[in-house]
Image: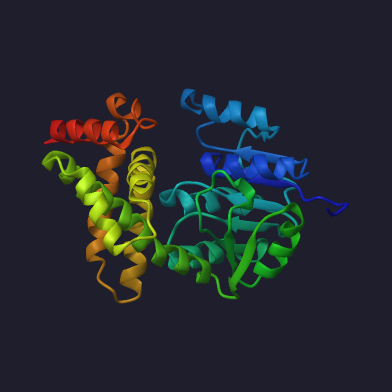
Amino acid sequence: MPDIKPALCFIGFGEAGQAIASGLREAGIERIAAWDILFPEPAGAKLRAAGEAIGVARAASAPEAVRDADIIVSAVTAASSVEAALSVAPHLAGRPFVLDINSVSPARKQETAKLLGAGARYVDVAVIAAIHPARHRTPMLFAGPHAEAAAAALAPFGMHLSVAGAEVGAAAAIKMVRSVMLKGIEALTLECFLAAARAGVVEEVAASLKNNYPGVDWGKAIAYNLERMAVHGERRAAEMEEVAETLRELGVEPLMTAATVRRQREMGEIGTQQSVRGVLKQDRAAMLNAISAAARDRH
């Protein structure tokens, strides 16, 4: 572990920010600050409490958070990534690394890099696995002209980093394109097994899928995919809108991706209902029954 440890700050302190911050704190980084637009609001109580528990200094504004930071992690919603960069751009000093871990298109990452300009060493970052339980050790891809230097600065703290390329957008391209499959499978799981539940053939369909995909434990996959959509569907929908934009940039019509956006958003809205939230840790039958009932009520 290096003798001189970087000072970090997080712009956006939701699930990803908290997970990475807590892991790096335990790995020995002592100076960590954070700012989230929800901090001053009642809705930010859980975020504030998480920061206190981790040992993260709660800033009063984005400019205060980035003051004296060596590494800035942007971990906001997809729709807010440019706004987050604008909030800190005039206040950067010392050319800090800016790690943009937001799930946005390569073009959006390139736009953000240009916006920050020479005042920052911008790094396009793609988080390519669930942030829990690995936290800061979750596999990540870095890209851009400063990717190698940023990876070298953080590798001593146990992060699992790979450099995807020297061009901003290289990591985002991998993240966006793989989401077509990963988030699409989640949406297909909902559609398939919601229909199976109503037809009374859940076990039969799950068993038959093993003939084609013997390496997949569908019993676990069904519950896992439904739970992730119920908890994060709205965020996943926003990410898939960025995926659709990426596909258009590549000249691919996002037919399946557009449908995935709708399913993810619908499930995110259903997942806010207490009747669904209350069964997410139960078995898949209870989950499917609650989701089915909630979906019927919507139509």
Residue under the point 77% across and 56% down: 156
**Image location of residue 276, percent across then percent down:** 30, 29
Q: Quadrant of the C terminus?
A: top left
Residue 183 shows in this picture: yes
Residue under the point 50% across and 67% down: 110
Q: Nearer the viewer, residue 231 or 63?
A: 231
Left or right, 126 with respect to 293, comes to right
Q: Quadrant of residue 55?
A: top right
Q: Quadrant of residue 47?
A: top right
Residue 234 shows in this picture: no
**Image location of residue 250, percent across then percent down:** 35, 75
Q: Nearer the viewer, residue 202 or 10?
A: 202
Residue under the point 48% across and 22% down: 42
**Image location of residue 233, percent across then percent down:** 34, 44
Left or right, 27 with respect to 249, comes to right
Q: Nearer the viewer, residue 162 or 290?
A: 290
